[in-house]
Image (spheres, grey):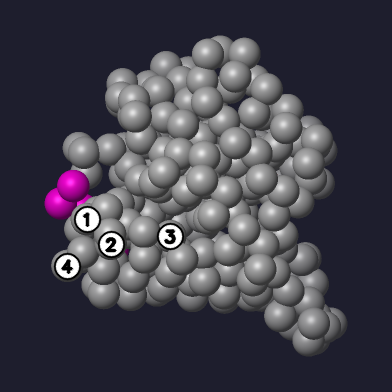
Amino acid sequence: MSYVFNFQGRTVMVTGSGRGIGRAIALGFAASGANVVLCGRTKEQIDAVADEIRNQGGKALPVVTDLTVHDQLENLVKAAMDEFGKIDILVNNAARSFLRSLLDLREDGWDKVFDTNVKSVWLLSRLVAKHMIEQKGGKIINITTLGADKAEAGMAAYGCSKAALKMLTRCMAREWACHGINVNAVAPGFTRTDFSKPLWSNEDIAKHIASFIPKGRIAEPEDVAGAVLFLASDASDYITGDTIYVDGGTSTS
Ligand SMILES: NC(=O)c1ccc[n+]([C@@H]2O[C@H](COP(=O)([O-])OP(=O)(O)OC[C@H]3O[C@@H](n4cnc5c(N)ncnc54)[C@H](OP(=O)(O)O)[C@@H]3O)[C@@H](O)[C@H]2O)c1
């Protein structure tokens, strides 16, 4: 997919960028000229994306990071600053989920989902925002989901964590607008990645899901990247605290 944005000379950090939507976002930024900081827990995956970017003439820094470990967040930001001297754009994409009913969900399962999907976003954004404030501006984009607004059986911890992330987006936007930092969210609908593979890998279920999407097909990771690039670009300078839905029209009903 080709994008119309130019991020030459800018540095973007994308969490969870070794596969799926995060990988597509990282490659979209690299194709538009940005220096890309990649992170995730699986070294082989982020190394492979970094190689892909370098092979196309771009600059990439893979940093193995477990976002739920505070020291590792500090290490990630320091590594990015040491390599590129600034962070212009942060994309909080990494997330985890469990399919478990509220009656069966374990307490530590709830905590793991919230630690990854909400607490780590607050802590990493705060570390990065301190540099953005010195730089007099920046863009933060959080990846939420349609499930932040619609209750799905078995997805309570995930849905509640993403609803909290949607509110965190608005809170950060409110507090940091005065520093020139824009904070927005992108909410994908059902997207073809490992995350959702148990569903789309079954042809009958995939057809059933697509039948509820006005555009008539499940999203590809690249569909989500375009909205993220827009929110990271100068074209969206007066938009903050908002959410763009990338769901093929699903939320119209
Ligand atoms: N796929 C969908 O249908 C869909 C729909 C709506 C919203 N979304 C959202 O889109 C985003 C990306 O989802 P995806 O479908 O691309 O998922 P995915 O393929 O499972 O990728 C998730 C990424 O997050 C990373 N990650 C998870 N926990 C981490 C941690 N503690 N520390 C560092 N990295 C961590 C994973 O890397 P490691 O495992 O290597 O750490 C991986 O790179 C998520 O925010 C998700 O909620 C997805």
Tell me what residue is drawn at x 76 percent, y 36 percent. Answer: 45
Q: Which mark is residue 136?
A: 1
Q: Are marks 2 and 1 in contact (CB under 8 Å)?
A: yes
Amino acid at the residue labelled 3? Val
Q: Are marks 1 and 3 in contact (CB under 8 Å)?
A: no
- Horizontal side of residue 90 vs 193, given as left or right: left
For mark 4, does the 10 Å Cα neighbourhood hold few (<14), some (14 to 19), or many (20 or more) residues?
Answer: few
Spatial CA distance of label 4 from label 1 is 10 Å
Please report whichever mark, 1 or 3, sits nearer to the chain's N-terminal start.
3
Q: For the residue labelled by badge 4, is the local secondary structure a helix, a strand or a loop?
A: helix
Spatial CA distance of label 3 from label 4 is 16 Å
Spatial CA distance of label 2 from label 4 is 9 Å
Residue stretch in magenta: 237-242
Q: Are marks 2 and 4 in contact (CB under 8 Å)?
A: no
For mark 2, does the 10 Å Cα neighbourhood hold few (<14), some (14 to 19), or many (20 or more) residues?
Answer: some
Spatial CA distance of label 2 from label 1 is 5 Å
Residue 213 rendering spot, x and y as whole percentages: 51, 41
Amino acid at the residue labelled 1? Lys
Q: Is mark 4 within 8 Å of ligand 1?
A: no
